[in-house]
Image (cartoon, rainbow, N blue to C red):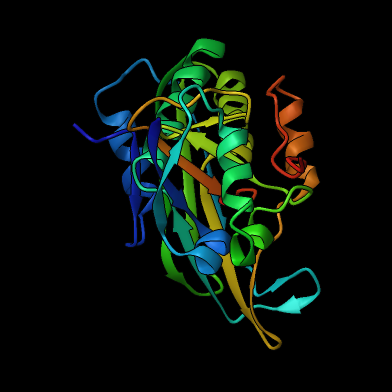
Amino acid sequence: MTPRVSIQTEDFDLSAEVAALRAQDAGVGAVAAFVGTVRDRNDGAGVSAMELEHYPGMTEKAIEAMIDEAMRRFEVRAARVIHRVGPLLPKDQIVLVAVTSAHRGDAFQACEFLMDYLKTQAPFWKKEQTPAGARWVDARVQDDAAAARWGLRSDNTGGAS
Amino acid sequence: MTTVRVRYFASIREALGPGETLELPAGATVGAARDALIARGGAHAQALARGRALRSALNQALCDESVALSEGAELAFFPPVTGG
């Protein structure tokens, strides 16, 4: 059986992942999927490459817990999350969140919920190469706000103490 | 005494290395561990400084600094996360 969560350096195939999610389940009436990709600009600077670091072990546990929470909140039949780590280039795929449900409302909501949750609570860090040198990407307050819409306690950018 | 394994990630790892072992009085909290590391001065004081946005995880789950440490625990400090 396909795992729910994969952290990998390799690329992924959206069609193949969605097909696998649907294959054994004729009750699926809706599939929502999000793919995040590397932009060639961020915070006013050109980005020529990126390196993604994570916390092995915690990352998988955190995302598994997020999927459990999505299944408590929404009528989700299956979910799949793939997040790449290591070196990436502009246009590369970074992350896939795919959700199946009987109806579209739950699929859309669960997919967005998982992305908002992952953005603020999963231990990944991006370092990007710009003309001025390498820099760690700053967390965005908008991501905390997006997580807060779901009632998630999110102080990712705050944290100062 | 309580011995914990401390791990660092991203910019904190670049400043302090991948991690270290830390001994603290029994019942110490995550915040006390951070303070003990800051008290070493130098790169530790800078990377873990109060006022810097820093997140912590105990045994691979996000936690706040009031949580008490247990013997052999894995404690991690890292900057705000930026995945997705």
Which residue ends up furthest to the bottom in the rendered image? A131
Measuring from the top left, give residue A92's x and y in whole percent: 49, 67
Q: Is residue A159 left or right of residue A128?
A: right
Question: How many badges with numbers are in the image?
Answer: 0
Instruction: Say whether residue A119 is visible.
Output: no
Q: Which image quarter: residue A160?
A: top right
- The image quadrant of residue A62 is top left
Front position in the image: A19 or A130: A130
Is residue A2 something that shows in the picture? Answer: yes
Residue A113 screen position, x and y as percent:
61, 29
Task: Give the image location of residue A49, x and y in percent.
Answer: 54, 78
Along the viewing direction, whichever of A12 and A155 lies nearer the viewer: A155
- In the picture, measured across the screen, residue B21 lies left or right of residue A134, that is left
Q: Give the quarter of the image for residue A6.
A: top left
Residue A111's place in the image compared with A45, above or below, is above
Does A75 sit above or below residue A79? Answer: above
Identify the residue at image location x=50%, y=62%: B13
Q: Which residue lies at the image location 60% right of the left edge and 73% below the top edge? A: A128
Q: Is residue A88 left or right of residue B41?
A: left
Q: Quadrant of the N terminus of chain B?
A: top left
Residue closer to the observer: B41 or B14: B41
Q: Name the residue: 37% across, 36% down.
A: B3
